[in-house]
Image (cartoon, rainbow, N blue to C red):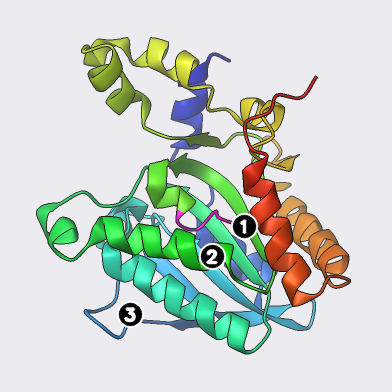
Amino acid sequence: MNAYKKVQAARSNQRPDAKKYIEQMIDGFIELHGDRRFGDDPAVMTGLGFFESRPVTVLALEKGDSNEERLRRNFGSANPEGYRKSLWQMRQAEKFNRPILCLVDTAGAACGIGAEERGQGQAIAENLWEMMGLTVPVFSVIIGEGGSGGALALACANEVYMLEGAIYSVLSPEGAASIIYKDAAKVEEASEALKLSAQDMLRFQVIEKILPEGADYELAAPSIKAAFSDALKRFDDLSPGEIRDQRYKRFRRLGGEKE
């Protein structure tokens, strides 16, 4: 499968959305709303629940599973209030010593005039800054598209995983074709150049693990659940300072290619 076909597969409407994974993995999930500044952003789901009887905080970029839901959730492209809502929940998770699970599926942050007027760039930057200093473990899973800073704002984690059919990129192939090649028709060439597949991300050590998802995605939820469970056990032995330092060191070493 060439790179652009992988992009199309990652965007498929047949892929389970974040809400489905939460329903399969998190017991007693309670969604929390609002950023306490402007309003609520349906593109970002945040809340509390139990994972293997342990309280956790869940943050998810949610595209929706129907035309009506996709429109309501802006196809998973979050506005500043969505990132501020997630930051509020991350701070609460740290206060009450809850691990954080992030599920990422977005083509990128919302880029409308309203989003810019309300401080989109600052909201994303504030998330990155605050996430680096968290003293509770953060684990992020790219479940479909991981696009640009809109995805990174929920992926500044201790460990990042990708489903085998997901993509993770600094820019959409369409955007890269228009900006780099000055030709929107060169989207396939741009897809190859971006090295955005899960296999590429593992090779460049941008992620820790590729998770199998199966032909009809039947393995995806069990794969995420197993990875999260294993990670929690490993990070339980670390102190708050060690958790924060591990995350910092992880990002300092990004970009080195595995032999």
For marks 1 and 3 on the same chain, the one whose residue lies earlier in the sequence: 3
Q: Determine if residue 34 is in view.
A: yes
The answer for how far apart the CA atoms under marks 1 and 3 are is 21 Å
Where's the N terminus, which quadrant?
top right
For marks 3 and 2 on the same chain, the one whose residue lies earlier in the sequence: 3
Q: Main secondary structure of the magenta part?
A: loop
Identify which residue, 87 or 31, lies in the foreground. 87
Q: Which mark is residue 184?
A: none
Residue 77 placed where, x, y %? Answer: 32, 53
- Specify start and end residues of the magenta stretch as a single range: 153-159
The answer for how far apart the CA atoms under marks 2 and 1 are is 7 Å
Q: Which mark is residue 157?
A: 1
- 92 left or right, relative to 110: right
- 185 left or right, relative to 62: left
Residue 158 belongs to the span the image colors magenta: yes
- Seen from this angle, which residue lies furthest bottom? 96
Q: Residue at x 21, y 49 (%)?
A: 111
Q: Which mark is residue 131?
A: 2
Given contact means CB atoms under 8 Å apart, are the residues at marks 1 and 3 in contact?
no
Mark 2, other Cα within 10 Å: few <14 / some 14–19 / many ≥20:
many
Q: Residue at x 37, y 24 (%)?
A: 173
Q: Determine if residue 68 is in view.
A: no
Q: Secondary structure at mark 2?
A: helix
Given contact means CB atoms under 8 Å apart, are the residues at marks 2 and 1 in contact?
yes
Q: Secondary structure at mark 1?
A: loop
| Identity, as a three-letter code, of the amino acid under mark 3 | Asp
